[in-house]
Amino acid sequence: MNNPMKKNEFAVVLASDNRGILPLSVTVFSLLSTAAPETFYKIYILSDGIDGENRNSIERLAAPFECRLEFIDVSGILEEHDFPHTEQWPVPAWGRVFIPELLKEERGNILYLDIDVLVCRDLTELFRTDMSGKAVGVVFENFSRPGSHFNERLEMPLPCTGYFNSGVLLMNVDVFREKNLVRAVLDYAVSHRDRLTCPDQDALNGALCELTVPLHPRWNWHDGLTRRILKNDPRERFWRGVTPRQAVEAALEPGILHYQGVHKPWRYNWRYEGERYERAMREAGLLHGPLPGRTLPAILKKHLYRPVYRMTRNKILRLQKQFEKEDGTCS
């Protein structure tokens, strides 16, 4: 139940089916275990057929924390809409589009999270983002430019900031409702269906490209970007939509880690931030032995990457000192 002593009450939405229960559980645990004492989360899970046993397991996981947890069945939400959904991009992937309609009692900012994310800190700062009348706060992957992979393909005007990752969305549902943006995203998906490579993400980008607020990359950071810092030139103004300073800040103190890509951290692999995810699994009681997938080739590959990680860490710390010196904060 809601606690009147909590002064920060925020709504967070996730979406899953039975196949995603493990990462969904980790995300819910990481969200709740990093909450500040004054933070109260209302967690809505858009369920595509999650069964009773799995619902009970999520509820038991959340029980030690002060929160509200609610499952919303969305299994039939696409039946009346003629737009692309496939096994790779199923109902849960599209569920985020319908959040303003599904949560009619909510106002202001609502946070959507993919289930392959790990929350690393309290999210009050993120929820307090000034949306300035825009629809969605996002982390950009690339800036608009002539000939980009998205401007021409998705007919996104060059004045649009760029292309964002939709795994973390700070949605101003009031603006969505005022401008009928759910309908706009669905219409865009239909009219551009032959151009969509990541259908839900592409449709959100195309329909909302002029209604975005850029977020600091710490709110949707992934370890591939951390590793890329090793080869990036610090003299460049931007690295894939973020400044070198922002990249260093996000790598050192991520707010939300997004484990995008095919190598998921709930299986043994070489990912830079894999150990952080494994610790969260163990703290949540979701892992009692070694990670699955621990084969000799996987172990060797992880050891081969260790020197790369050390060099990456050293470069990040050197850049941090450089930026501190520029700011006059070093002693």
Image: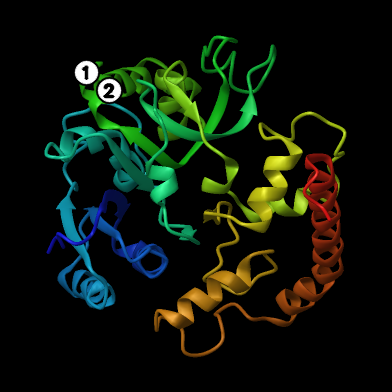
Quadrant in the picture for the C terminus: bottom right
Q: Residue at x 22, y 76 (%)?
A: 63
Quadrant in the picture for the N terminus: bottom left
Give the image's coloring scheme.
Answer: rainbow
Farthest front residue? 331
Secondary structure of the residue carrying tag 2 is helix
Looking at the image, residue 206 sits to the left or right of residue 106; the answer is: right
Residue wearing tag 1: 178
Q: Residue at x 47, y 27 (%)?
A: 213
How many C-alpha atoms fall within 10 Å of the one at disc 2: few (<14), some, or many (≥20)?
many
Determine whether label 2 and label 1 are within 8 Å by CB: yes
Q: Is residue 292 above or below residue 23?
A: below
Dot 2 amino acid type:
Val
Dot 1 amino acid type:
Glu
Residue wearing tag 2: 175
Looking at the image, residue 318 sits to the left or right of residue 225; the answer is: right
Looking at the image, residue 159 sits to the left or right of residue 201; the answer is: right
Instruction: Report the disc number at residue 273.
Output: none
Closer to us: 75 or 105: 105
- Quote the CA–CA distance across marks 2 and 1: 5 Å
x, y (%) of residue 99? 24, 38
How many C-alpha atoms fall within 10 Å of the one at disc 1: few (<14), some, or many (≥20)?
few
x, y (%) of residue 224? 68, 52
